[in-house]
Image: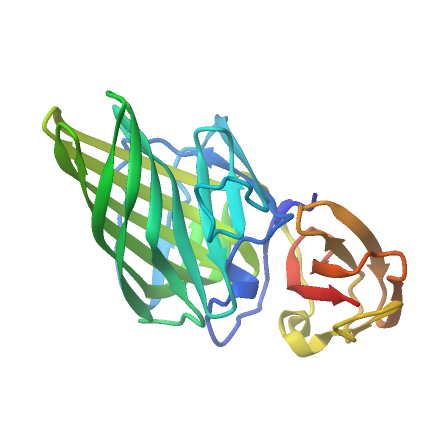
Amino acid sequence: MKQIFTSLLFFAGMQISTAQLTQANHALAIGDSYSTYQCGDTLTISLVGSGAGVNWDYSSVPTRSSIVKNYTVSAPSNPNFPSANVLSSSGSSNNSYYNSSASNLLYNGGNVNAGAVSGEFFYNSPAVIAAYPMSLNSNTTSSISGSLNMTVPLTLSGTFTGSAFVVLDATGTLTLPGPATFNNVMRVITSQTIDFVTSIASGTVYQVNYDYFDSGVKGPLFSISTTTAVTPLGTFPQTVITRQAIETITVSLPENLLHDNAISIFPNPVNESLNATIKASEDLSLSIHNLQGQLVSEEFLKAGNNTIHTENLVKGLYFYSVLDSGGRVLKRDKLLKE
């Protein structure tokens, strides 16, 4: 299984002119994996700025490297989430189910924890958490509904309705401990208001997530997640701050590697062989995963034309990823074997 990003890369003297999120550089895909460190849940974090050119300096935020969560992304098998095609999980009590497509990313439910309140939510009407492509000021509102199973403090079942709102409200520069500086960062704010009803009580769950993305890194670089459950038993707030658990190094890469036309993968659908044309001197690798997240092929790519033999792959749908030597995903797409 490929890691999404094994080293934190920032690019000296290089800026990307257009900050935009798409399925390829934003949505988690089967075969991805990453880890996060907790940065504390009682910190006062400045959420300064919106619009273009914001400077977020979080270089002094302490990192609790002993509190780490390892996430894997796989094909879901839980029948309670029939519409989901992606599962992101760091354990049995921390699962998130999504439906990912080229046009949007839908949240189908999963585990919710807010202090002393825990449960699992099943969305019949999913939350739209991205409508691609997303650029500055892109926003989407959706109505949500479904059922829930609460496990803490009481075992209860019920239903819920509510709304979700997502906006890419700011772009700019993010500095994390290291220091590591990213000049092409997009902040996405996702909020949900969930009104639930059970057999003995009703209440509301409020969620707001501030996620900081770089177009070259899958998964948020930095996240501030707040959840508040208002119930007859009391109000239970929780704030969790995390960052990707990755080392800091400096690497300079050719700018044209950041553009799709620098990497051509064809034909698609493929039969006996796949061609990869690389218009840069950087050595890359290409990995192919099946829908179960299993690595079925991996090849090193040189500048120029490369041939990858695919005659031994069984017919069906796969996902391929092109990565640089540091594990940074430069290109990802579906691959159909005929």
> Is residue 309 among the parts visible in the rendering?
yes
Question: Between residues 84 and 242, which one lies in front from this camera angle?
Answer: 84
> Is residue 248 among the parts visible in the rendering?
no
Relative to 258, residue 150 above or below: above
Answer with left or right where residue 80 lies relative to residue 323. Answer: left
Question: Between residues 19 and 21, which one lies in front from this camera angle?
Answer: 21
Horizontal and vertical percent position of residue 28? 54, 53
Question: Between residues 228 and 211, which one lies in front from this camera angle?
Answer: 228
* Residue farthest bottom in this picture: 261
Horizontal and vertical percent position of residue 88? 51, 43
* Residue at the image position 77 percent from the left and 76 percent from the top: 279
Relative to 186, residue 59 above or below: above
Answer with left or right where residue 33 lies relative to residue 273. Answer: left
Q: Quadrant of the N terminus?
A: top right
Answer with left or right where residue 205 lies relative to residue 113. Answer: left
Horizontal and vertical percent position of residue 32? 61, 48
Answer with left or right where residue 330 lies relative to residue 233. Answer: right
How many callouts does the rendering have? 0
In which quarter of the view is residue 325 placed? bottom right
Question: Between residues 300 and 311, which one lies in front from this camera angle?
Answer: 311
Q: Quadrant of the C terminus?
A: bottom right
In which quarter of the view is residue 42 placed? top left
Q: How is the image coloured?
A: rainbow
* Residue at the image position 45 percent from the left and 45 percent from the top: 81
* Residue at the image position 26 percent from the left and 45 percent from the top: 207
* Residue at the image position 33 percent from the left and 63 percent from the top: 54
Horizontal and vertical percent position of residue 123? 34, 48
